[in-house]
Image (tube, grey):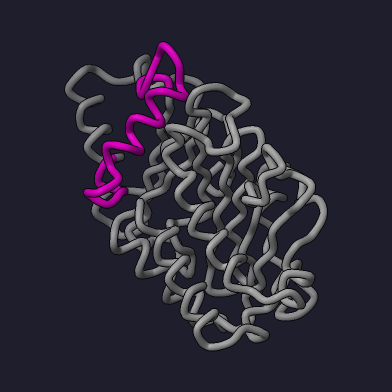
Amino acid sequence: MRSKVDNNWQITKLTIAESFDKDEQALLREIFRSLHSPEYAEKVMHQVEHDAGKEGFGGSSVAFFGEPGTGKFEFVLTGRHVTRRCDGDSVDGAAFGGPIFYGHAAESDTEKPDHPGNAYWFQALRANEVFKALDGKQRDLVLLGTSRPEAGNDTVHLTGKTQGLPGIPVSALARDQKDLVRKVMSDLLAPFRKEDADEALKLIEKNGFDDLHMAFYKNQDVGDDGVWDVWQIEGPAMLWYFRGKPHVHTWVHIRDQA
């Protein structure tokens, strides 16, 4: 359970509302907010409240692993469209303490092409800027058919490969295009606290930025508007998989080695 990730699951049988009094629930809210940057904390909290339905944040569940104050301690919160971890570096070589998940069904489960109100759609728009910066031959390499299936932990399985991953390798990009991919990676990490974002980028660079591959998926284009709703960035020991159809599901797994 400590390393499990999925789009909708409870790490404990009892929810926050069933397990904790009001003061404790308020503390858990502050812990969750603190896992995110000040600019995005309230937006992320609103997403969790919204997607959980009538139970709101209290419909999520939490688990604690290890002994607080020992250094080997981890906090995990799960629910619909949320798996977040706070490990304080107790899990060696893993950004975020292991795989995480975030998503949002803003106005309905089947969102419109521009995904109005979605907390994370900005990330797809940023990724699409990379696609726009590619030439014709590069687009032929980066634009594929149908993306990977979603299957819990198997979704974020890391291959250890530096070649043969889906899409175009960053090594095949020009310098300005590589710089853009780096900026996009930073923007993807913008909702999270600085410590986690810095660690994630450090691990990605350690494993070779040029070994990252980027792919977009034309068979899952909401509205057939050429703004690619489904895309991913994958390297030997990382995966950022954004599936924007019918609403946003995002799977993230970043380690020092596969």
170 is higher (above) or lower (below) than 104: below
Q: Nearer the viewer, residue 102 or 58?
A: 102
Residue 18, image x, y percentages: 37, 14
122 is higher (above) or lower (below) than 126: above
Magenta extent: 33-59
Residue 184, image x, y percentages: 46, 66
Residue at (28, 42) in percent of width and height: 41
Horizontal relation, residue 130 to residue 89: left or right: right
Q: Nearer the viewer, residue 175 or 4?
A: 175
Residue at (62, 54) in percent of width and height: 241
Residue at (43, 28) in percent of width and height: 61
66 is higher (above) or lower (below) than 55: below
Residue at (40, 31) in percent of width and height: 47
**How many labels were placed on the picture?**
0
153 is higher (above) or lower (below) than 15: below
Q: Quadrant of the N terminus?
A: top right
Horizontal relation, residue 83 to residue 224: left or right: left
Horizontal relation, residue 252 to residue 89: left or right: right
Give the main secondary structure of the magenta stretch. Answer: helix
Residue 237 occupies quadrant: bottom right
Residue 212 occupies quadrant: bottom right
